[in-house]
Image (cartoon, helix red, strand yellow):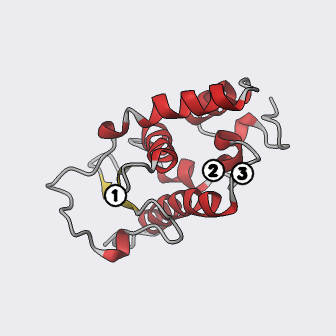
């Protein structure tokens, strides 16, 4: 199935394809916003716990270009997969929170290759084509940092 921008659903991991497909079926931007707020409400599930990181966070985990001050961590798991954690310091950063939840729920406990295969169009497929350039850059930055951790993990490089 094509999700509206020429991207095949098969390019997304199954859990991610399900969310993208559901959002693609919503044509009303207010309904889409409501669904994204509902997703952002699950942020505590992917929020970085104090045993992984405490404020003030190391700048190496800061998402470049994100106005909501988002941070990303990745922890190797015993089974060789990664567990991603996030924080968004701006309490109004609902889009960054939603993006973090979507990525965390889709990628935690999955092989690093899944993260590396996610196309950059994900931001537009989730948030719509009318997303502002600034917000889009920040959300893209979250995906890029997740993919950077996956790439380093796959190459056997340290994540810190």
Q: Quadrant of residue 157?
A: bottom left
Q: Residues within 10 Å of mark 3 (few under 14, many from 20)?
A: some
Please tell me whether mark 3 or mark 2 is closer to you in this view.
3
Residue 4: image x %, image y %? 82, 37
| Residue in view at x 65 percent, y 49 percent | 123
As drawn, the label of residue 140 is none
Judge from the rendering whether residue 7 lies leftward or rightward of residue 46; answer left or right: right
Q: Give the distance between the C-alpha atoms of the residues marked 2 and 1, in whole angstroms.
A: 25 Å
Label 2: state its secondary structure: loop
| Label 1 vs 3, first from the N-terminus | 1
For the N terminus, the quadrant is: top right
The residue pinned by badge 3 equals 121
- Front-most of 39 and 121? 39
Q: Are marks 3 and 2 in contact (CB under 8 Å)?
A: no
The residue pinned by badge 2 equals 118
| Residue in view at x 47 percent, y 44 percent | 94
| Label 2 vs 1, first from the N-terminus | 1
Residue 146: image x %, image y %? 48, 58
As drawn, the label of residue 89 is 1
Q: Are marks 1 and 3 in contact (CB under 8 Å)?
A: no
Judge from the rendering whether residue 156 lies leftward or rightward of residue 142; answer left or right: left
């Amino acid at each position: 199935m094509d999700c509206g921008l020429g991207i095949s659903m098969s390019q997304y991991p199954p859990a991610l394809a399900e969310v993208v497909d559901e959002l693609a079926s919503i044509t009303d931007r207010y309904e889409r916003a409501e669904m994204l707020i509902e997703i952002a409400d699950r942020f505590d599930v992917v929020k970085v716990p104090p045993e992984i990181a405490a404020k003030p966070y190391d700048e190496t985990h800061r998402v470049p270009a994100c106005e909501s001050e988002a941070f990303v961590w990745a922890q190797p798991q015993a089974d060789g997969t990664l567990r991603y954690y996030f924080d968004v310091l701006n309490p109004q950063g609902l889009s960054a929170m939603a993006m973090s939840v979507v990525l965390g729920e889709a990628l935690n406990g999955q092989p690093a290759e899944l993260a590396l295969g996610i196309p950059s169009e994900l931001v537009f497929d989730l948030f719509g084509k009318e997303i502002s350039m600034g917000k889009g850059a920040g959300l893209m930055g979250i995906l890029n940092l997740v993919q950077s951790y996956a790439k380093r993990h796959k190459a056997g490089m340290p994540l810190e």
